[in-house]
Amino acid sequence: MKLLIVALAFVALVAAGPVAEIKEPVKILRSEFNQQPEGGYVFSYETDDGSQRSETGDLKETLDEENKPHQVVVVRGSFSYVNSEGKVETINYYADETGFHAEGDSIPKSPVARR
């Protein structure tokens, strides 16, 4: 009998808990991708939740550690989304042989060294 009372209390507790909100999947409003024959590309998309992204990739010839030429893809782009406070956040970025570099209000800035 005690087990039945404990089981019923547990079921009542679970049933009284918060109900998770079921969200609709984000809809894609626009999406484009164009591959260029030489290896570059252009792509972009936009969704109904306010997110969007656009990016280009271009081939660039650079020298490796042994001063031998090789090609890298240089990427430039930006993306935006609506943060939890309802503000649009935008990040601009590029990536090349020196690495990935991003800028935006939500990205912390490195402190400037003082002398």
Image (cartoon, rainbow, N blue to C red):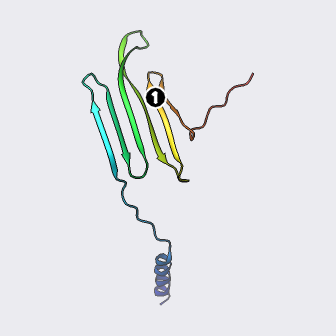
Of the pair 74 and 53, the residue shown nearer to us: 53
Of the pair 15 and 91, the residue shown nearer to us: 91
* Residue at (27% x, 26% y) in the render: 36
Badge count? 1
User: Relative to 35, is 76 on the left or the right?
Assistant: right
Q: Quadrant of residue 41?
A: top left
Which residue is situated farthest in the top direction here?
67
Q: Is residue 29 above or below residue 110?
A: below
Give the residue number, with chain letter if any, for mark 1: 94
Q: Residue 15: horizontal and vertical position, in percent?
A: 46, 77
Q: Quadrant of residue 26?
A: bottom left
Image quarter in which the C terminus is found:
top right
* Residue at (29% x, 36% y) in the render: 33
Q: Amino acid at mark 1?
A: Tyr
Q: Is residue 74 above or below residue 16?
A: above
* Residue at (46% x, 80% y) in the render: 11
User: Relative to 49, is 32 on the left or the right?
Assistant: left
Q: Residue 68: horizontal and vertical position, in percent?
A: 38, 10
Which residue is situated farthest in the bottom direction here?
1
Q: Residues within 10 Å of mark 1 (few under 14, many from 20)?
A: some
* Residue at (44% x, 21% y) in the render: 97
User: Relative to 12, is 110 on the left or the right?
Assistant: right
Identify the element where label 1 is drawn: strand
Q: Residue 94: horizontal and vertical position, in percent?
A: 46, 28
